[in-house]
Amino acid sequence: MSMEKYKPSQEEVAKAEAMMTDKQKRMSKQREREINAINFETALKDVCEKYPEFSEKIKNSLETLQLGKYHNEGPKMDAHLSLILTTLEQINDGQFHESLKDAGIQEVMKEVAVRQKEGDPEKSIVNPALVDYTFLHDVAKPDCLTLKIEGKKKGIEITWERWKEIEKAGQPYQLDGKPIVSISYFHSSDGATCPVPELLNQLV
């Protein structure tokens, strides 16, 4: 068995981590974050080059604030998308959350998330369609921001340009002097859901 094809089991990884010192664990986590950041930037560049008409929308979506009880991976949407890519890479490496022990479900997830690299059948990669989806599925969010204001029941719909003005003032974020407690991505004036750009419909 070649080293390139060999992937340690979750049990082997856990055993190796248990033998590491605290300093080694910190260094390992730091290295993991650096690798994830490089993978994210590479994937972002590739998707923007593949869909240049969506490049600006994709980059705007990364800057969209996450404020509220949902999507708490980080302050902005880039953290949400980065976690999706990291999870896909972990599936490619045969690593699953400890709560997912069913081998059948794991196999189904691998069938969906993993593909053989073109021209190199010995190497597996994350399904390119899922990488595209990661960056495209939230592109409409900057266009349908709704602010929940402290003391008010009804949300206030705003444009992306208006939000950037609010953001410049810094935290804690306020609208007309009143605290913003959460942000959602829904404009009732546009119907039941955020309108997906017509261009995106053409990609489906």
Image (cartoon, rainbow, N blue to C red):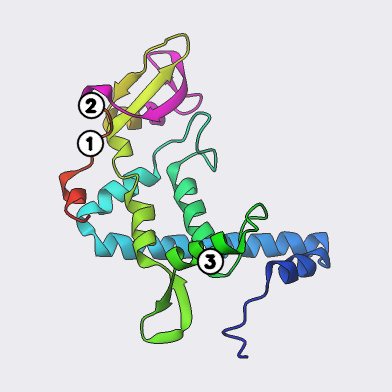
Image mark for residue 88? none
- Distance from disc 2 to disc 3, alpha carbons, whole Å, reads 39 Å
Please tell me which residue lies in front, 29 or 137. 137
Residue named by callout 1: 195
Q: Residue furthest front?
A: 104
Image spot of residue 158 (x, y percent): 29, 24
Q: Quadrant of the C terminus?
A: bottom left
Instruction: Give, as a three-letter code, the residue at label 3.
Output: Glu
Label pair 1/2, CB-CB below 8 angstroms: yes
Residue named by callout 3: 107
Please tell me which residue lies in front, 93 or 38. 93
- In terms of image quadrants, where is residue 117? bottom left
Residue 38 in sight from this viewpoint: no
Neighbours of disc 1 within 10 Å: few (<14), some (14-19), many (20+): some
Please tell me which residue lies in front, 32 or 17. 17
Residue named by callout 2: 191
Image spot of residue 135 (x, y percent): 36, 53
